[in-house]
Amino acid sequence: MIELPKKLQNKSFRFIKIRKGEKAPLEEDWPMTNNYKYNDPDFNEYLKTASAYGVACGFGKLAIIDCDNKESAEKIMAVLPDTFTVLTPGHESPHLYFIIKDLTKKIVMTDNNKIHHGEVQFTGFQALGPNSLHPNKKKYGVLKDIPIEHITKKELLAAIKPFIKTEEKKKPCESGIQMDISLVSKNIKGLNPSSNGELQGPHPVHTSEGGTNFGVNEETNLWHCYRCGTGGDTIALIALLKGITACEKLVKGYFSTEEGKKDFKSALLIAKQEYGYRTPEEAEVEKQVKLARELTEAEIAELKKPKLIFNILREIQKIGVVGEEKSILALINRIAMRCVLNITKTSGNIIVLDDTGLGKDNITEKLCRIMLTESKTLFSTTCISDKVLNYWHPGTPETSWDGRVMYLQDPEEDTLKGQAFRVRASGDPKNATLDKDRNFHYIQINGKPILIITSMKASIDIELIRRWDMVRLDASKELTRAIVRYQLKEATKSKSTTDSNELLQNALKNLPRVNVVIPYGTELESLIDSDASIMRTMTLKLLDIIRASAALHQYQREQDENNYVLANKEDLAYAVFIINYCDILTAQALNKKQEALIKYIEEKFLATEEPVSFKQIIADNPGMSETWVYKQEKDLVERRLLQMKRHYDTGSGKDIKCFIPDMLLFVNIKVPKKLPGYFFNGLEKDINESRKNYGLNKIKLFDRSETR
Ligand SMILES: [Zn+2]
């Protein structure tokens, strides 16, 4: 016979039948129908033989606080008023009975550490009442036989606050820096794998009661503090661990606040210094630097010597290249461009034209071998198809083309016109799409090389001109004679009299890649005065040629506080020379007579601002027959070197055919009156001295008549 305690004999309360020897309800639907008042005859009959009964919570707003452990129960009891309390034989913690008018449902007590402390049982739940037998045969006893207290939900929540989740998970504090969190979290003590896939343990900065209020998720790369509800990414973790930012501040958006920006900077610095973090840009710089080994003191000394460019010229002369200094100067600069990190990528394209096919590969290849290392920074081939070009990569597909030179010797016209070639020549190649057996293949392209092609007769269209610089080798008889003379002279020797300068060559091969600043950039505006839209491209090119010169002379230039090499005006002299040498006329593979015709029309037009008629051309140029000039019309107009205009002639009273030069021809850079440095002031003299040895005429690097 079980006796129901007096304090439970409340008309509003309900009780239920329990299965023998268990804790589970005997009857189904007990929360709705099969429950009984304390004085229900059927229930009292049941109590006569039963070993246990259940107290159905929720009826009469009865709530039972059922704690899992003594510790949390004691803390709750300390806050709430004394009430009817039942000792449970299952575990040491008691059941606290309260009437809570505004409670609506059961509360599970799981704290921020995900530790379970028990439940506040309410509607739909029941607990064995006093004098019932636990399945372990021990009896539920009354610990405090006093009236059941009335409390509010607010009072309840205040009491159980440490044992429930205080707030929703706040959004994590993210910095935008992609950095593996395990690099930092591996040093935190006491983290162990938990069931939710996190590594959990005591908070490394503020204390932890449960010992697991801190979690790191290596999959999401985020950490979380279950006490503060805060968390964030790896940089936020560094800020937390290094005491830069307090735990409770680390929520979404913190790094955008004034205070947070400073904290972010400090944490990022530690990420770099202590954890070896590199931004993608910095990682790229480091990777590129590895293209080369470190220079020795002796090699650096070679790069510090005056007349560096002339010394490189001499290296190529030593291996049998005669003349062609202007083209070589342009190519030296272009190869050095691979060492400029902050480059406009389209600048790296150059075509070496040679009508006769005599010298281009000889010169280009020899220069490449002086300044580059085969299969490290130089990738050259004599025969490549458009498709194969797509798959070509330096080493592995992941290796970047940046900092390298791709040298295609006399590629087929089909290759030049192919998609792969266009992708390679474009400023920012990312991937190529191939249609193979009706399947599309995506090919990742990493970086962009300096692209040198040699061509016998480049059929370059005007679109390509914007992407390509051109140098044209001099196929003059004079030069041919000099080459023959050189070869005959060499045949008389058993060994070359001049040994190559290995130190200089190795220095060039391992020249570090650098960023370059042009401090006088804004001053350049006065040199560029064309309305032609091509000048936009040309200006970028001018800047990159200056940068390349500075990179080549990096051991002779100053650096700013960010280790950027500072270009000087000597680099400008080099650039002005190249821009004017590799101009549109040079590019067009014109014969001397065509060149003379265009020059004549250009000068006449600039002087008179009138279109130039056929009649006048023939009158002023005895060497140009009428038939010949008419023949040029189609050719040169098609190549956009000249424009044909109909012009009313007052003399004859008729419209007559006239020419004006195409706007593209006005593209050049004014040669400044005076520039400092060897390139502008001494190089020409040294070149002409050496030309004398080969019986070659003097050359001019700058057309000083154009000096403005
Ligand atoms: Zn915290």
Image (spheres, rainbow, N blue to C red):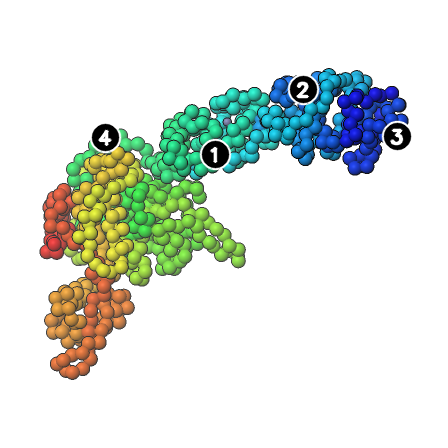
Real-space Cα separation, disc 2 to disc 4, in angstroms: 90 Å
Question: Could you tell me if residue 631 is visible in this image?
Answer: yes
Q: Residues within 10 Å of mark 1 (few under 14, many from 20)?
A: many
Query: Disc 3 vs disc 1: which is toward the camera?
Result: 3
In the picture of the structure, the residue carrying the numbered disc 4 is 298
Question: Of callouts 2 and 3, which one flags the residue occurring earlier in the amino acid sequence?
Answer: 3
Real-space Cα separation, disc 4 to disc 3, in angstroms: 108 Å
Q: Which mark is residue 82?
A: 2
13 sits to left or right of 78? right
Instruction: Give, as a three-letter code, the residue at label 2.
Output: Asp
Quadrant where the C terminus is found in the figure: bottom left
Question: Of callouts 2 and 4, which one flags the residue occurring earlier in the amino acid sequence?
Answer: 2
Question: Of callouts 2 and 1, which one flags the residue occurring earlier in the amino acid sequence?
Answer: 2
Q: Which mark is residue 42?
A: 3
Real-space Cα separation, disc 2 to disc 1, in angstroms: 40 Å
Q: Relative to 257, is 190 above or below? A: above
Quadrant where the N terminus is found in the figure: top right
Real-space Cα separation, disc 1 to disc 4, in angstroms: 54 Å
Tag 1 and tag 4, C-beta contact below 8 Å: no
Instruction: Give, as a three-letter code, the residue at label 1.
Output: Val
Residue 538 spot, x, y in % from top left: 25, 54
Tag 4 and tag 3, C-beta contact below 8 Å: no
In the picture of the structure, the residue carrying the numbered disc 1 is 251
Instruction: Give, as a three-letter code, the residue at label 3.
Output: Asp
Residue depicted at x 78% and y 27% = 10
Q: SS at mark 4? A: helix
Residue 355 spot, x, y in % from top left: 25, 59
Q: SS at mark 1? A: loop
Residue depicted at x 54% and y 22% = 208
